[in-house]
Image (cartoon, rainbow, N blue to C red):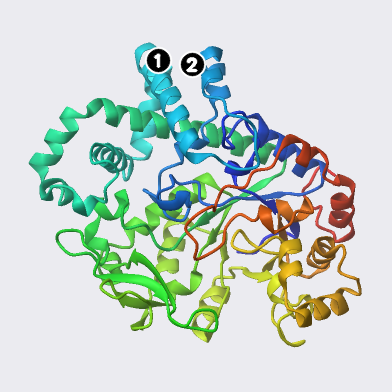
Amino acid sequence: MRFPRSSGTLVHPTSFPSSYGIGDLGDNAKQFIHFLQETGQTIWQVLPLSPTGYGNSPYASYSAFAGNPYLISPDILVEKGLITSEDAEKAKLPSTTNTEYEKVFKKKDRLFEIASKNFYSSKSAEDETKLDEFKKANKEWLPDYCLFMACSKEHNQDPWNLWEPELAQRKSKAIKKFAKNHQDEIDYQTWLQFEFFNQWHDLKAYANDRNVRVVGDIPIFVDHNSADVWANPQYFEVDKQGNRQLVAGVPPDYFSKTGQLWGNPLYKWDTLKRDGYSWWINRFEQMFGLFDAIRVDHFRGFDEYWTVSAEEETAEHGEWRTGPAHDLFETIREELGDLPIIAEDLGVMTPGVEKLRDDFEFPGMRILQFAFGSDAGNSYLPHNFNQNSVVYTGTHDNDTTIGWYNSAPDADKHRVREYTRSDGNDINWELIRYGMLSVAEQAIFPLQDFMNLGGEHRMNIPGTAQGNWEWRYTHEMLQNLDRQRILYLVNLSNRNVGSDQ
């Protein structure tokens, strides 16, 4: 599916300012949308909105379907009468440029328990109808997820394969007994999802009404400790006890002598195919309801994927296996229609994955920070782009452009200065300008690069477990942005189609 020539900004909702220690879906999200409007931008790209697990990573989630409840805005709960202003005040934290996850969890958990009890004790007939409609619309995943979260809470968040065998293997009698004894917790988890999706849909509508399209993110693999694997073990490479057998990763390369061992359980693609790919169809259907387009992470894995035994300590000893490729996406297209997908095609690509991408007209990604490490044939240099692509200065996994330039080898710095005919002192704006003026139909830039921020403000350092996913900006940082400079580049590069400017 082809997209109109346009531009936008990459920032996750956790990065918004707020009084509660973490960004949310309230007024500050709307202020960000106003910024997009004022600068002629029509795209907002986010990271996965799912509930975060290990390391607070949105790419390691308890569910591929659920929403992150900590993005729920307390201020909206006050407006709905589910909590008081005094309740909200107790949950507030000092405003900083870092997300304080542990403090947030404690304060928001207490707040949400109050809101949930008030909802159930005072819900109107209309509320009851809307809740029933929500349950029905999400019946494929919601009951399993809420039960999983209740079980996880009861077991101090231990991985599900360490629970008693009857629960881990979902024996009917044990499941029914647990559900009956923990119905209050299940109802609470249900309300959290109901409220999250209400707030998200309201915010997305607010964006769409202002000609802003929202691009989501779908990781190819799911976390082992998730409701997805627990509820559907037949689709994953796990044994009868739930232990992983085959896991995902990538083989050794220039960047890592031992490869990368991600540890996610691999899919049993033959089983999924026999089932008509129903799990994947449900997943994409929900994502297309939440977003106007989605970026598919590690797109190569659908063509072929690296398979490693779960007993291995590194990714060195594995093998390539063939993925579902065209068969999966043809099936999804038959069920759901046009596929507004961006293919994350970074790293080493093969003719097979390039054909898969191009046959469905999925735009690929071009990262300008990758453009200056070799010669003029580098595919990430703007003069080598094709139109059906999305250009970025960097992604959530990259340093900010200023941070990247400051730490780059001298030869790379020389090449980027030559290419941009600059002295490198305004390097983030130089790369933004080249990205805007390129033939790539979409140009998306991390908010940090518009804000002239250094490497201390990056979102994630791959391969590290601590200190990631924490970055936030302040009200002042957004207000001080050079809106006219952005708007000028948007207009200069003819990326204002559909904007209000």
Q: SS at mark 1? A: helix
- Residue drawn 24% across and 69% down? 245
Name which of mark 2 and mark 1 comes first in the sequence: 2
Q: Indicate the quadrant where residue 265 lies.
A: bottom left
Q: On the rendered structure, is 246 left or right of 63? A: left
User: Residue 60: x percent and y percent?
Assistant: 42, 54
Residues tagged 2 and 1 counted as in contact (Cβ below 8 A)? yes
Whether residue 304 is visible here, answered yes or no, is: yes
Q: SS at mark 2? A: loop
The foreground one among 102 and 118 is: 102
Number of other residues with Cα within 10 Å of mark 2, as a class: few under 14, some 14 to 19, many 20 or more: many
Q: On the rendered structure, is 147 left or right of 289? A: left
Residue at mark 2: 83
Whether residue 388 is visible here, answered yes or no, is: no
Amino acid type assigned to the residue bearing label 2 in the image: Ile
The foreground one among 234 and 226 is: 226
- Residue drawn 47% across and 29% down? 108
User: Residue 278: x percent and y percent?
Assistant: 32, 57
Residue at mark 1: 118
Residue 139 is labelled as none
Amino acid type assigned to the residue bearing label 1 in the image: Asn
User: Residue 334: x percent and y percent?
Assistant: 43, 62
Number of other residues with Cα within 10 Å of mark 1, as a class: few under 14, some 14 to 19, many 20 or more: some
Cα separation, mark 2 vs mark 1, equals: 8 Å
